[in-house]
Structures are given as C-alpha cells and as structure tokens.
Image (cartoon, rainbow, N blue to C red):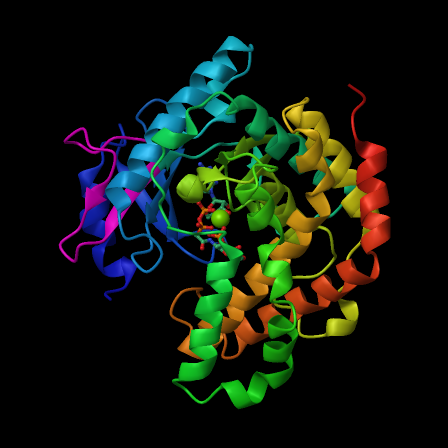
Amino acid sequence: MPTAEQYLKESLAAFDFGAPVVGALRFGQGHINDTFVVHTQPEDASCRRFILQRMSPAAFKHPDLLMENIVNVTEYLERMITQSGGDPNREALRVLRTRDGAAFYRDDAGCCWRVFPFVEETICYQSAETPALFAASGRAFGKFQRLLRDYPAETLHETIPRFHDTENRLANFKKAVTADVLGRAAGCREEIEFILAREADCSAALQAQREGTLPLRVTHNDTKLNNILMDRNTGEGICVIDLDTVMPGLSINDFGDSIRFGANHCAEDETDLSKVSLDLELFAVYTAAFLEGAEGTLNDAEIAYLPWGAKLMTLECGMRFLTDHLEGDVYFHIQRPGQNLDRCRTQCKLVSDMESNWDELAAIVAKSRPSR
Ligand code: ADP
Ligand code: GN1
Ligand code: MG
C-alpha cells in the first residue's frame, strides 16, 4: 500500500477548507488511521486547523458505509446537543465535505480520506493523569450512551462485522496460532496458554445477550481515553471522537474498553510488567462517572455485568494484539518489532489483576448503582 504522504497533496486539494492550506503534519497516536493536522490561513483571521485522515483499508472494508454512519450520528448528536443548550461546534464532530459535496475523497490508490474541523482548546490524553480526568472521560462516554439511547441502532451499518464478538475473536486467534505463518508462536507460548485457558469466559456477555439479558444499544466500541477531547480550561470531556466503530453493541463493552485502557498507570505497550496493574480507585471513579453521565440509561443487568465488560474487553484486546503479532503486524500500527506482543502482555497482566480483585470490582459496581 502506498504511504499516506504520497497522496497527501492530492487529498488536500479535494476539500474546500475555506482558506489556503499552509501545511499538513502527522498527528496523534491512533493505531489505525493515518491522521494529519492541516493548517490553513484565512485572510483576516488566525490560523484555522482541521484533522485530515486516511481511513485504514485494513480495518475498514466499506468506507462509504462507515462515513454514512458518521454523518448520521454526528448530525443526530448535533441536534441533541443544541436542544440541551450545549455547543455543537465543540461537543460533536462535524464532517467537512469535499469540493464535490461528498463526505469523503477516494484517492487513485482506492484509499479514502475525510476531514473534521479541529476542536480547539482541547487536550487529548494518552493516560489518566488524575482521577478527576478519568472521571471526566467516564461522564462523557456515559453521556454518549444517553444521547444516543433513542437512535435507531438497526439503521447503523456494521463497519467491522463481529467487532466485539469475543467468541469469534478467539476462533480467529486459534487459527493464527495454528497457521503460525512467521514461526512466532514458540516465542509466546505463555500468552497463548493464558488466552486459551479463558475460552469459557469469551461467551459470558454474548450468552447474556442471546438470552435477552443484555440489550443491544448504539455503542462507540473504542472508548479509549485518547478518543475523547478534554476542554483545556474546564477539564471536562467535551467531544467524543473516533466514531469509525459506532455500531449496535453492548454498553458494558464501552465501559470495559475504557477500564482496559485507562484504569492503570502504564502505556498499552509497557515492557516492565511489574509496573502494570489495575488501579481500583480509578475503576471506582470511572464506574461512578460513567453511570452519572448515562443518567439511568443502563438497566440493572447491564450494571451488574460491568466487571465482565472490563475483563472481556481486556482479554479480547490481548488476543487481538497477539493475533496480529502472529500474523505479522498487519492491523495495528507498530513502531518497533515485538510491540504487539508487549501490548498483549500488558492486557494479560490486567486480566489477571481483575480476576484477583473480582469480588471487589462487583462491590464497587454495587455501591455505584444509582437508586431508582
Ligand atoms: P485512530 O482511529 O487512528 O485512533 P482518531 O480518530 O482517534 O484515529 O484520531 C487520532 C488522533 O487525532 C486523536 O487521538 C486526537 O489526538 C486527534 N483528533 C482526531 N480528531 C480530532 C478533532 N476533530 N480535533 C482535534 N483533535 C482530533
Ligand atoms: C484501535 O483506532 P484506535 O487506536 O483508537 C482499535 C481498537 C483497539 C485499540 C487498542 C478500529 O483503536 O479496537 O482496542 O486500537 N480500533 C479498531 O489500542 O480496530
Ligand atoms: Mg483513536
């Protein structure tokens, strides 16, 4: 695949930024898309910035359907935020059209690009520097659930089929272990065994969904701390970004993915595992904040299953990193060899910590349950 830089000029020309473009630089720390910040210079105002992204063709097979989801959801959010007296320009993403009026541009190599206005005066954090910050992200992701509770989930396209189908993720993982195309399995036996030993867990939430205990909702499905923009002045989480995987899903997975990424003090690829541990205080803070932001949207069963959301998203992510390591790092961007294995190891360590503290997690959730 050509590099994004090879098509940058062509893509920039496809959009009407309303002012001359003065530069475009790589930006952010996402694992999936190629992201650039675009600087423009209006004649009589200060520099105006935009986010330009080449969507990952490895992750997204139908960028047209994906962008249809994003346009519909962002327009819906804009209406909901306006109705409740918020500022839609800062609290929702907006899709900037191409010169032809389309929601994205397809380059000569077949890759698709899109643009959002840059939400200024915000900070995107890679780790929860304070409990207050983590709580702010919890309120924002909880609010995201609430704002979309009446959105017709069945009208959304499944942008990555079976995205959080943990049983299917496990099946794919097993195939990668068996194929072992690069001979890497011998170097990660311990991690492979760790995941295989938790086969039964992979069905916990899906079984509850099949039985009708857990309802399908509109979910974000990638609720990492760095997929939320925090207001630089107030510290509140104001804008949920990275809407590529907004699909019908389980609320406990949105909760769980945030815990996986944020309720510890380490980077996802920390190599010193003695530093990696689940922080129970952060877990408690996030639980309370998520339920506060959701304002009664979640039912009792969903609340009771929140610890499962945390464990399953962490286990699933661990097996996805290891699958990609075994397959040759074709999905998650890496900056150094072995990075996906390191990422898998941190996830396994967090799963172990959750298992050791299982009763405590359930007690924290029970304490945070809103009275009805
Ligand atoms: P990926 O799927 O690769 O994670 P994201 O959509 O999360 O891509 O974008 C990558 C990074 O770009 C984010 O973590 C954030 O720092 C920044 N970003 C994305 N959209 C905006 C925006 N509208 N305003 C400001 N920063 C943004
Ligand atoms: C990817 O796009 P980004 O970096 O926010 C991935 C998530 C993983 C995450 C692990 C579309 O998220 O599912 O949990 O990496 N997104 C996609 O860091 O696969
Ligand atoms: Mg992201």
Whether 343 is drawn above or below 372: the answer is below
Q: Position of residue 248 (x, y in %)?
A: 45, 37
Question: Looking at the image, which residue is at 63% across and 24% down?
Answer: 297
Is residue 326 found left or right of 233 in the rendered image? Answer: left
Q: Is residue 348 left or right of residue 239?
A: right
Magenta region, main secondary structure: loop
Q: Give the answer, above or below, for where 169 lies relative to 61.
A: below
The residue stretch that appears in magenta: 95-115
Q: Nearer the viewer, residue 176 or 282?
A: 176
Judge whether residue 112 is colored magenta.
yes
**Image quarter in which the C terminus is found:** top right
Q: Is residue 143 left or right of residue 73?
A: right
Extreme residue toward the front, this view: 211
Q: Is residue 330 visible?
A: yes
**Which is more toward the observer, 91 or 213?**
213
User: Is residue 40 visible in this depiction of the protein?
Assistant: no
Give the x, y percent position of residue 190. Answer: 65, 82
Q: Quadrant of residue 312?
A: bottom right
Quadrant for residue 182, please give it. bottom left
Q: Quadrant of the N terminus?
A: bottom left
Residue displayed at 54% across by 73% down: 339
Q: Residue at x 66, y 54 (%)?
A: 260
- Residue 163: where, in percent of width, then height? 45, 52
Please provide percent x and percent y for residue 22: 31, 42
Q: How many marks?
A: 0
Identified at 54% across, 90% down, the residue is 186
User: Is 20 contained in the magenta span?
Assistant: no
